[in-house]
Image: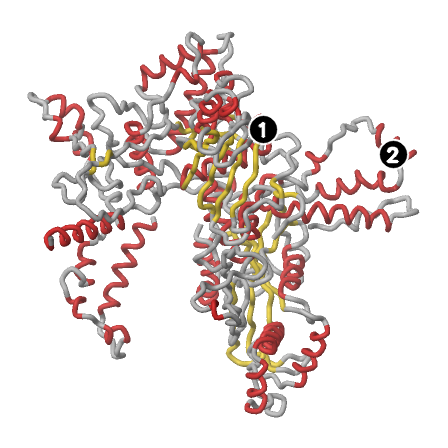
Amino acid sequence: MAVRESSRYLARAVPRAFAPSARPQAFLGRRNASDEAPSRRLSDQLDELETASSLTTAVSDSAAKSFDPATRAKGRKTQLPRSRYQFRSPKYDRGPLHPHQPPPPSDPSSRLFVPGPFSLPRAEQTYNSTVASDILTLCYVHTPPGFKVPPKAPRLREWDDSSPYHKNRPLRGPRGGDVLRLLRKPIKFNNIPEIERITVHSYVKGAAQENSGWLHVAGMAVQAISNVRVETFKSKASVATWSIAPGRDTVAVKAEMHGETMYHFLGKLIDVVLPRIKDWPGVKGSSGDSSGNITFGLEPEHVAMFPEIEVNYDMYPPKMIPGCHITLHTTAKADKDARLLLSAMGIPFYGKIVQ
Amino acid sequence: MSMHTSLRRAAARISSSTSTILPTGLPASQVKTTTFVCSQCRHATLLRRPKRPYTFTQLITLSDGSAFTHRTTSPAPVYRSTRDTRNSLLWNPSSSKLMNVEDDEAGRLAAFRARFGRSWDANAPAAELASSGDTKDAATTKAEEEAAKAQAQAEQEEEDNLLDLISSFGQEEPQVSGKKKK
Amino acid sequence: MLTGSNGARRIASLMRPSRLDSGVCISCQETLGRRQYASAAAASELATSSSPNPSTFPVVKPVYTINAGVVLSRPPQVTRDLEPFEKAYHFYQKRLNERLALPFTKYFYFKRGTPADVDWKNKIKERRTPARDIGNYNAYASDAWNDELLLGSKESDPEHQVEALVQDAESTANATSQDTSKKEEIPRPLSRVTEADKKGDHKSLNRLLPRTLYLLVQSKEGYWKFPSLPIEGDETLRQAAERTLAQTAGVNMNTWMVGFHPAGHHVYTNRKPHVDQATGAELHGEKTFFMKTRIMAGQADLSSSVEKLQDFKWLSKDEIAQFVLPQYYSNIKNMLADR
């Protein structure tokens, strides 16, 4: 409906834009010579637009019924060669100067093409229709007319030039630690916090202690619950009691979800898995890395409650289903905003809320 | 030599321009990164097909009858959940139906409390009745926002109970009117 | 901040004449005065000498009645209906995915020889693909190129896909269960169109499930508007809005007021300023500030309304345009959700 209406509005708005007005318009003064080029002229671009949507055009019934590409192709005496209807992308990228270039990754014939989205996730619709506007209203900060933001001291401090060696030194870090926290800007319509990605990470100590079977099972389980292929990681730290040496043992799997997959995972987690956990108090209020990413853990028996693992629970070797850490990365700059967003999406928090 | 450098510059420009038209929604690992080669490179890079597990569409039916589809690796066409946000206490803190842990059909517990309990114990069922009036239209209750307010509500509930305890001290009828709509 | 400086600041702000125009409200004036004193004391000194004292030159400003309005809304309850283009796009991407995703590992989910395995094999022979919602299509067959839907086909419709899923579940349950006499019945998702939609009942909260609904009331003159009442005494906007809600739509609602700031405002100027009997001030019109509120449970009840309201309706954004005055709608439309 919106598509059809927009063309109507366009048709009404365009003559108004080109009508001569008595008032000299401000943007006419800033015209560039390149605007006159045929490729940039507005009227030419508008001529290319079709006035009607292709979905509304009427097709005669006889034409629609007689169109059957499959039987038409079968009825051909000689079949077309495969190259006539199928393009195969080159297998290798041989550099930008090679005559045989692979198509861009957005092209379905490209080897790097990832199809999708396949649906409009429910959690995403909840966010867009309800949560985002509520957060915007909640976080509004009123500044009266004439209000000037008081200037703040620079975050990196100067050296006090008490020593000649201070010359050309890089600036000092903030007081009380060298960490530069993210700047929290006031939340406006264009920086409402949203969920950016979700990471499922599982550290499998059995993979280093016993055999790699633990890692394979963990990879299958994490892939099943997250719908994406997992990456494996080697240990960075040395754990003497588990006999794990850095750089030697592959001990962890991680799956990273974006976009549609992420929202499907979030919906499944909130609506089905978390309520089934017995006596689960919620996510701890002090969780978070103080830049808007919240992490919580699931025990192995909780991971087994995912419907994907439940459906073939017998196929996983007994007691080898891993626990995992789930990190919800948001675009919020502070944990306070991230918690507001996640609790609006349905994740409960408990305990002392650390801001 | 000059010919060589101009070629290099052209290469760098082309590769950077191709990288800008890539869709930004792709994860960083799949987007081809621009490399500014300093000498002519003769090797070819294998374009690996991204590996993704097979996904089905599954219909999830929650305990209150609401249903939605999602993409999942499980081949089961329908998943019916018995325990979810619609009937768990953590997501419905004001629901009296879920709060009732003990079955007191015969009224024996209440009778015991009336005889031996304190006024605080006698107060509890009445308070629950008062709060059940708010949530009789459970279908329109939005679990998400309820959860956001859960903390505050729980605290207020406790406070109310204490206030009732103070106000109803020494009285036969506990004051229900102190409980207001939240 | 030290508490000792607080009293000093208050005295200073009393001594210093306000150099703000009186169009700024009291709480904003406090904010401005505080911030400026804290940050730029030198600048305020300069301003003191230059600005005239407003108390000595009283500026006649038009006086308005300040109203607190409530935009009580019910968020969407179900997902929205997809556009035809979106349906077609999702369906086409699913068929592309058949070819590009890793093949389904059957042995990981079905043990060889079990009834479920036998049933799965029979089904695969019929529909040629593991997925149930993409129609009869095999991405690896010789006619895999024929992956586009023909005109009028139903496969891309979400209702059709859900029906296919439920039918598949039913047939699996019937084929794998021991007793063949009983037929398994799996409940379909409930209808997205409710009774209230069919009857055109504007008072029900169960209408137009995919849209946001707003509470509109009809004043005794017959105009439709959001509930609003004048602010009394020195209560804040939020307190006034809560009182408005209780006094117009009754207390039988579980509501949540979003934040402490209004989401929009509406100014109505009278043609002729009329004089208020109580204070003798000339009222030029009224300004209404709307607070955003969500309803969780309950229903509006106008029987105890102080304004003698006639009627109420739960309306979506485009229906509101048909009921309210055009001037009113142009003021409120930007704070209403499209969906």
Badge 2 and badge 1 in a common chain: no
Direction left: furthest residue: A77
Residue C71: x %, y % from top left: 55, 58
Q: Which residue is nearer to you in this view: C267 or A91? A: A91
Question: Residue B113 has which mark?
Answer: 2
Placement of C241 over or under B144, stated as above or below: below
Q: Is residue B65 visible?
A: no
Q: Counting other residues with Cα less than 10 Å from the Cα at mark 1, is it few (<14), some (14-19), or many (20 or more)? A: few
Q: Which residue is nearer to you in this view: C66 or A296? A: A296
Tell which subunit mark 2 falls on.
Answer: B
Residue A274: x %, y % from top left: 57, 34
The mark lying in front, picked from 2 and 1, is 1
- Residue at position x 50%, y 32% in the image: A202
* Amino acid on which disc 1 is placed: Thr
For the residue labelled by badge 2, is the local secondary structure a helix, a strand or a loop?
Answer: helix
Question: Residue A241 has which mark?
Answer: 1
> Is A334 situated left or right of B159 in this image?
left
Between the C-alphas of marks 2 and 1, the distance is 55 Å
- Residue at position x 65%, y 37% in the image: A281
